[in-house]
Amino acid sequence: MTPKRKQRMMLVGLMLGGVAMAVGFGVNAFKQNIMLFHSPTDVAAGTVKPGQPFRVGGMVVEGSVKRSDTDLNVYFELTDHAQTVPVSFSGILPDLFREGQGIVAMGSLDDQGTFGATEVLAKHDENYMPPEVAEALEKAGNMPGTEANYGSKTVVSP
Amino acid sequence: MFRFAGALAPWLGGLCLLCLIVGLYLGLVVAPADYEQGDSYRIIFIHVPAAWMSMFVYVVMAVSSAIFLIWRIKIADVVAVASAPIGAAFTAVALITGSFWGQPMWGTWWIWDARLTSELLLLFLYLGYLALRGALDSPQSGAKAAAILAVVGVVNIPIIHYSVEWWNTLHQPATITKFDKPSMHISMLRPLLIMVLAFQLLYFYNLMIRVRTLILEREGRAGWVAKLAGESHG
């Protein structure tokens, strides 16, 4: 390899390394902003002030969904298996919304600590299977995806 | 290289067509519906291969750009230019099909989560690469500047790949990982892998054709091209 080529290779390498480091630092600094949603543990730790809009993500607690008979209001609880947050929402829920399903809600906390959602999105997991297989797994008690990793990426910071 | 690409192209094209037919038939007709998503999940047979290829093509483009920058090998530049529009198309397909799936499943067409945003950035990198080439006056400096952009932009690839693990995203984590058992039933996995192969072949088929065209364009004044043109006309 000629010295010229070696020099160019070093240059390309340095450029790539420099940019990678810059992006790495940038991404690390904005870690919180890149997080799409907070977990109920973050909320319980007081990361977000009442009135401030943010997203919360978690699993809908089994048996917690209460629908109003007269309007579209829905109440349910979100959990990350450590903490729970009560949520109220008025509107149409996505098809995948059900108890035990992961969702992401946009809204803000009121003074009582209830999360008033303005938008509810369903978070699908990475499992795909035919209905018969799902049924069989359910019977055997081996259903995957019932504990989506909501707690693992928690950011608790001042 | 010109002859090699010409000889390879029909084989790649034929195999690709075969895989596409088999993959689409197995995926859309034979594979069962999903337990939660019903038939909507079938978009995965297009979405996932397109998204994988969008990243694969970019890596090919970045590596050949680096080879071009360091060794000044012209064919490496040709491969990079030929790849850019194909990669951009794969990225666009991944974004659009994902959006169609997101509307009924998540309840939104678009959300600024890390996965979707970084994939959109990839589309802009492809388009920026092509625009930068054309923006500079001399083709030589345009090629060099664009190659630098392609090399630097490769930083985005691991970000796309790991975005669903590093951050909270609405997008689900990977179904198929190298070290783990795929969290997908075999009857759905098989057509998906065939489709991945089909898209891979589709890329190389298109690449061969585009490389041939670009070589002809660039070497238009060379003796062998004139001879070739004479043969086909005479």
Image: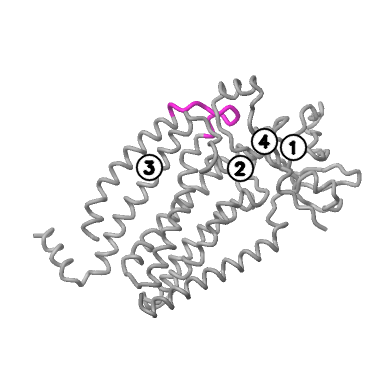
Q: Which mark is residue B183?
A: none
Amino acid carrying mark 4 in the image: Pro
Amino acid carrying mark 3 in the image: Ala
Q: Which residues are magenta?
A: B29-41
Q: Which mark is residue B172?
A: 2
Q: Dot 2, crowdedness within 10 Å: few (<14), some or many (≥20)?
A: some
SS at mark 4 in the image: loop
Q: Which mark is residue A94?
A: 4
Q: CA distance from mark 3 to mark 1?
A: 42 Å
Residue B106 vs residue A101, the one in the foreground: A101
Q: Dot 1, crowdedness within 10 Å: few (<14), some or many (≥20)?
A: few
Q: Dot 3, crowdedness within 10 Å: few (<14), some or many (≥20)?
A: many
The answer to whether B126 is drawn above or below residue B198 in the figure is below
Q: Residue at x 88, y 44 (%)?
A: A113
Q: CA distance from mark 2 to mark 1?
A: 24 Å
Amino acid carrying mark 2 in the image: Gln
Say which residue label 1 marks: A91
User: Residue B56, how many percent across, how many down?
Assistant: 45, 53
SS at mark 1 in the image: loop
Q: Dot 4, crowdedness within 10 Å: few (<14), some or many (≥20)?
A: some
Label 2: chain letter = B
Say which residue label 3 marks: B198
